[in-house]
Image: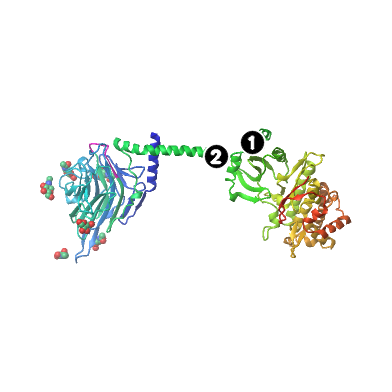
């Protein structure tokens, strides 16, 4: 509890430090609200960490570092004479002794020609002068706050010696009724002193008041004095004190302002440092006051800690089951992903796909850039199979596949972690008006990459993988603009040779093979259909389904086919290529695109075959007449996507989600 009190006090001190401002100029005007930043010339005086000027040694002084010129030439008479300039100063002080009522000799505001007062006496003379009548050569003016000498607890004006020219008991004349109110200088209550000299009226006023009382109109002391002979031209201003009997006595100055030729700038009490707690008596009082506060503080801290604990638990809660142990290394901790993506902040959002949002992140331990996809899912259904698939997919290794690094599960949510692809998805280079575009050779390289990845999935890996969602927006570009097939969140795995059994048709409208819509069975052939559409999309720079000027839906494949039939196949090439392409390559790719998107699955070439055609190992065959007629029949019925459904009326497929947007994903519930 003691340390808690200390903590609270330390906090208060810190706050006090914060408000401390000092300004100092050489034009004879300055204000110190606390002395932390002041560069006073100190002689055994110290500035405390909280910014208090403390004078507590046997003999100590503190002066404003720059000397001030107190002389000016008077032109009031024909003869030029030197007179002392007007000045005004105010300061807040507090004096405390170890025992109430017993303190040392006091504190004085001093104007002296030197800061080296070491020759001057200590002890009862406030480190300044002694009681002998001074000479004019001393050039010292002091306003003393005496707590032991003479009448004890008085305020005096001293010139050249400590024999006060005028002194009065400490107090002030209240503005309300003009009555005199006593003040105890060593009460440790902060008080403010003003000293104002007017060179015209040759009058020096000294005023004292508690800090909460504004400057009283009537000064405590008003002395008629011409400072012209007393002041040297160059003088220093500061404070002096001495502590003799009890070294426990401390004189604090909290703030100080000074001005030549004008009124002193007012002190901002809110910026003054806080006085430290001193002595046993005030301590117990303070303790009594602080104890309930500290208790409340502790209780609040405890409650906050408990709240934070549960909040933390909830915030980073995951779902983890025993069977997941085998997938160990692929499992990510949610907190890591949360931190990596900066709490899934919107500024890290890479895109919103059909299945969830994708965020960019950096895993700090590995300094690895990642993309995190948050997929909503019903946690009770087929998670285990799904995770098994995810982990299997994580084992896929191909330079044209976006590497899946692992997953994390939360309630109703699955997070998939992928390698981050610097150049984003391909579709933004194809379909964004005035957006970035790609040269023909870049498109070719990307297409070849996708071919290579599909060959790997369909034939070269240990299991047959049907991607089920081949499309431009699922092709991502790495830093070298290589095309990489991504988003295997939808892919299903099949053991080689077994008949595919699925209950859901998942894919994207425009890329769905007719038989997929009818039967709901995804096969490598359905992937090849989507790939064919993808080839046309990349070559033509058009979406699979678009709207023409008559507001009719136009299937890209029909449009290309029509141009092919009319012998104007090169007219379909993306105009953004501005004719810069290899005609043979373009013609071949368009032809392959049409072959792959053949309505009949068995007529479509396999990926291996497509690659043979591409490499020129085998000349591409002409499109079969059946394809032409079949497709023409489709075209006749063509009302966009509906045509597919018309072709297979036996289908019990029901469309759950269909959006007019050609890139929208659809889910079909089949048998
Ligand atoms: C006063 O006048 C004297 C002589 O003219 C000049 O040297 C001195 O600098 C002047 N002092 C001030 C403070 O103007
Ligand atoms: C001005 O100076 C002259 C000679 O130095 C002196 O006689 C005269 O009294 C002075 N005038 C005043 C107003 O001081
Ligand atoms: C202060 O004055 C004394 C006596 O004149 C001298 O010995 C001492 O060096 C001076 N100190 C400084 C800092 O000038
Ligand atoms: C007072 O100080 C002066 C020098 O400033 C010194 O000559 C004198 O002896 C001192 N008197 C006492 C009583 O200390
Ligand atoms: C000091 O000066 C005053 C007059 O200003 C005089 O009455 C007193 O006797 C003097 N004291 C000493 C010690 O010279
Ligand atoms: C000193 O106080 C008197 C009132 O007692 C006032 O008239 C006078 O202007 C004051 N002088 C200064 C320099 O503040």
- On the question of residue 645 being in view, the answer is yes
Q: Quadrant of the N terminus?
A: top left
How is the protein colored in the picture? rainbow
**Taken as a whole, is the magenta stretch helix, strand or loop?**
loop
**Highlighted range, magenta:** 244-252
Q: Quadrant of the C terminus?
A: top right
> Does the closest atom of ligand 3 sit within 8 Å of the Cβ of label 2?
no
Q: Measured from the top left, where is residue 424 in percent x and y? A: 67, 51
Which of these two is toward me, 204 or 10? 10
Q: Where does label 2 land, which residue?
A: 312
Q: Measured from the top left, where is residue 362 in percent x and y? A: 60, 44
Q: Where does label 1 land, which residue?
A: 320
Q: Residue at x 24, y 60 (%)?
A: 72
On screen, residue 359 versus residue 28, left or right, reads: right
Of the numbered discs 2 and 1, the one sitting upstream in the chain is: 2
Q: Measured from the top left, where is residue 514 in percent x and y? A: 80, 51
């Amino acid at each position: 509890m003691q340390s808690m009190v200390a903590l609270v006090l330390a906090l208060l001190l810190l706050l006090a430090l914060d408000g401390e401002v000092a300004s100092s100029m050489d034009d004879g005007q300055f204000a110190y609200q606390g002395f932390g930043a002041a560069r006073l010339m100190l002689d055994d005086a110290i500035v405390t960490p909280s910014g208090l000027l403390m004078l507590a040694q046997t003999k100590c002084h503190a002066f404003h570092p720059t000397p001030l010129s107190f002389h000016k030439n008077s032109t009031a008479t024909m003869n030029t004479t030197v007179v002392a300039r007007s000045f005004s100063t105010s300061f807040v002080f507090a004096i405390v002794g170890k025992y109430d009522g017993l303190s040392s000799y006091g504190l004085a505001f001093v104007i002296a020609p030197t800061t080296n007062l070491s020759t001057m006496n200590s002890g009862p003379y406030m480190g300044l002068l002694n009681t002998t009548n001074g000479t004019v050569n001393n050039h010292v003016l002091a306003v003393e706050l005496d707590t032991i000498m003479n009448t004890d607890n008085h305020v005096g004006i001293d010139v050249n010696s400590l024999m006060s020219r005028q002194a009065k008991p400490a107090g002030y004349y209240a503005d309300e009724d003009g009555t005199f109110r006593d003040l105890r200088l060593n009460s440790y209550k902060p008080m403010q002193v003003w000293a104002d000299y007017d060179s015209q009226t040759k009058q020096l006023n000294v005023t004292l008041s508690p800090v909460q009382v504004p400057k009283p109109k009537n000064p405590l002391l008003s002395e008629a004095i011409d400072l012209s002979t007393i002041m040297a031209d160059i003088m220093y201003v500061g404070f002096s004190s001495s502590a003799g009997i009890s070294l426990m006595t401390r004189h604090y100055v909290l703030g100080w302002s000074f001005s030549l030729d004008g009124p002193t700038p007012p002190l901002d009490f809110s910026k003054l440092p806080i006085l430290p707690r001193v002595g046993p008596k005030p301590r117990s009082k303070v303790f009594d006051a602080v104890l309930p506060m500290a208790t409340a503080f502790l209780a609040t801290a405890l409650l906050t800690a408990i709240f934070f604990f549960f909040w933390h638990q909830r915030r980073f809660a995951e779902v983890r089951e025993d069977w997941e142990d085998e997938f160990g290394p692929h499992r990510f901790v949610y907190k890591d992903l949360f931190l990596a993506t900066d709490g899934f902040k919107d500024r890290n959002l890479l895109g919103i796909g059909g299945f969830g949002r994708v965020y960019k992140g950096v895993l700090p331990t590995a300094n690895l850039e990642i993309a995190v996809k948050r997929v909503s899912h019903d946690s009770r259904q087929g998670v285990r199979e799904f995770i098994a698939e995810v982990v299997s997919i994580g084992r896929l290794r191909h330079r044209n596949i976006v590497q899946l690094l692992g997953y994390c599960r939360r309630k109703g949510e699955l997070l998939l972690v992928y390698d981050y692809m610097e150049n984003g998805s391909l579709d933004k280079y194809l379909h964004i008006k005035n957006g970035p575009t790609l040269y023909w050779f870049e498109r070719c390289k990307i297409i070849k990459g996708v071919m290579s990845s599909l060959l790997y999935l369909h034939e070269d890996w240990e299991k047959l993988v049907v991607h089920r969602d081949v499309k431009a927006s699922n092709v991502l570009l790495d830093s070298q603009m290589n095309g990489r097939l991504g988003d295997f969140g939808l892919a299903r795995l099949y053991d080689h040779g077994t008949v595919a059994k699925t209950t859901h048709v998942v894919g994207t409208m425009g890329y769905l093979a007719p038989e997929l819509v009818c039967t709901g069975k995804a096969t490598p052939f359905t992937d090849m259909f989507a790939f064919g559409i993808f080839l046309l999309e990349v070559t033509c720079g058009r979406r699979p389904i678009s709207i023409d000027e008559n507001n009719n839906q136009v299937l890209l494949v029909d449009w290309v086919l029509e141009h092919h039939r009319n012998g104007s196949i090169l007219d379909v090439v993306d105009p953004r290529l501005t004719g810069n392409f290899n005609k043979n390559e373009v013609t071949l790719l368009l032809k392959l695109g049409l072959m792959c998107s053949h309505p009949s699955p068995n007529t479509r070439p396999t990926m291996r075959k497509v690659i043979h055609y591409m490499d020129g190992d085998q000349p591409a065959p002409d499109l079969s007449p059946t394809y032409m007629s079949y497709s023409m029949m489709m075209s006749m019925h063509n009302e966009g996507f509906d045509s597919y459904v018309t072709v297979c009326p036996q289908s019990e497929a029901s469309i759950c989600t269909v959006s007019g947007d050609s890139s929208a994903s659809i889910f079909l519930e089949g048998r």
